[in-house]
Image: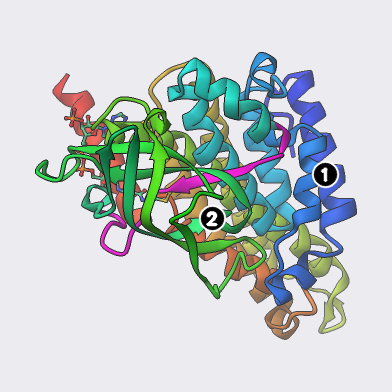
Amino acid sequence: MTNFDLTEEQQAVRDMVRRYAREKIAPIAAELDEAQQFPEQSFKKLGEMGILGIGFPEEEGGMGGDTLSYIIAVEELSRVDGSHGITLAAHCSLGVWPIYAFGTTEQKQKYMPKVCSGEYLSSFGLTEPEAGSDAGGTRTTAMLDGDHWVINGSKQFITNATYAGVLVITAKTDKEAKGSHGISAFLVETDLPGFNLGKKENKLGLRASDTRELIFEDCRVPRDALLGELHRGFPLFMKTLDGGRISIAALALGIAQGALDASVPYAMERKQFGQPICEFQMIQSYLADMQTEVTAARHLTYHAARLKDAGKRHSMESAMAKYYASTVAMKATTLAIQIHGGYGYTKDYPVERYFRDAKLCEIGEGTSEVQKIVIARELIKQHAG
Ligand code: COS
């Protein structure tokens, strides 16, 4: 990988996470995937290393790194195991970031040190059975009763749910308001009465990551658990997703790079017709496509991260990075299996896992179709002046 003008700090994060991923995660990734086992020990260790608070200021309890350092950490984990990558992505982008960006001083003092150190894992409860791409279709409600909000409803496909200490969730606070209006965000501690975990999903890929349903039955959270402005939860989570989508781009990028990492040495070692298959031009064509497209995806992803670091609007760039990197991950992992031939279709090589893991990138945090809507709308807006 070329340097991409990384600072010394960004390179140090990359090297640290890369070393940890290669030495500690790569040897156990296949086993965790097979057993659908969440890597609790890894996240304890990543918390000790500061990685769970990597993109947040030291005074908030974070490591003091920037968005790009965090994105590189997701990429390096995903290069050996997408389940680790998505767990970090959901924690930092969807759980911690909204607390940091929209929390009151009291909320930040209460939660930031815990989520940055890994004492609490965190995540985001937005999706519901009737509110997937149509994120404004939220049916979960939060009604004020004295000094408490009473939450009722359910959330689906929530990453990290079992292991989270606090979650950001969304609920309708004005039942009369239509569509994206009248939704608010809340901080919910997961040991509250009325908060229950539902079914654990048995997934195609990212099987060592935790994905569950959340069920709220008269779950009472304190009045000051409201995060951000009342009834303005929709823009809050759209801004959150603008950042989250860069981390899913990094997940896709890492998986695609992992597929390429596995394919080059395999193509150099595997002999057919009396020579290594890397000497055949059709295999070279596959490798050339993978290298070119992975590099292009990295440019888009790092660019979106740099815009976020510069405090500039990055909705379109995040969507482009996610859309493109996900497409690249699907293609690169498909080609990696093709290069490995019959062996690639078995669990003896990691490329079948990468292939299964890649598919989520085209779905989670907004499908590729949703990304195209975001890109086109931004483009039209820019042209309208
Ligand atoms: N940043 C800040 N505000 C934003 C925003 C952004 N990126 N995008 C939209 N908003 C604001 C709009 O300005 C508008 O504000 P007002 O109510 O003040 O006018 C409001 O949010 C509604 O926006 P819009 O009309 O664009 O909403 P739509 O219902 O048309 O949104 C899409 C359509 C499909 C783009 C949206 O629902 C979406 O992204 N869906 C996918 C959700 C998703 O990713 N789910 C997976 C979650 S996994 S955690």
Percent across and percent down for residue 338 are 64, 75
Task: Evaluate whether residue 304 shows in this view.
Answer: no
Amino acid type of the residue tagged 1 in the rendering: Lys
Looking at the rendering, which quadrant does residue 209 occupy? bottom right
Q: State the residue position of label 1.
A: 45
Residue situated furthest front in the rendering: 146
Quarter of the rendered image showing ligand 1: top left
Looking at the rendering, which quadrant does residue 24 occupy? bottom right
Q: Secondary structure at mark 1?
A: helix
Q: Residues within 10 Å of mark 1 (few under 14, many from 20)?
A: some
Q: Which residues are magenta?
A: 117-134
Q: Quadrant of the C terminus?
A: top left
Percent across and percent down for residue 239 are 38, 31
Percent across and percent down for residue 161 are 55, 55
Dot 1 beta carbon under 8 Å from ligand 1: no
Q: Please check the rendered image and state whether residue 315 is part of the magenta-colored stretch, yes or no.
A: no
Q: Tell me if 56 is positioned left or right of 39 in this view.
A: left
Dot 2 beta carbon under 8 Å from ligand 1: yes
Q: State the residue position of label 2.
A: 159
Q: Are marks 2 and 1 in contact (CB under 8 Å)?
A: no
Question: For this rendering, which residue is in front, 269 or 30?
Answer: 30
Task: Evaluate whether residue 188 shows in this view.
Answer: yes
Q: Tell me if 220 is positioned left or right of 347 in this view.
A: left
Question: What's the CA distance linking mark 2 and mark 1?
Answer: 19 Å
Total marks in image: 2
Q: Tell me if 24 is positioned left or right of 105 in this view.
A: right
At horizontal 90% and vertical 52% (from top left) the residue drawn is 23
At horizontal 65% and vertical 50% (from top left) the residue drawn is 85
Amino acid type of the residue tagged 2 in the rendering: Thr
Q: How is the image coloured?
A: rainbow
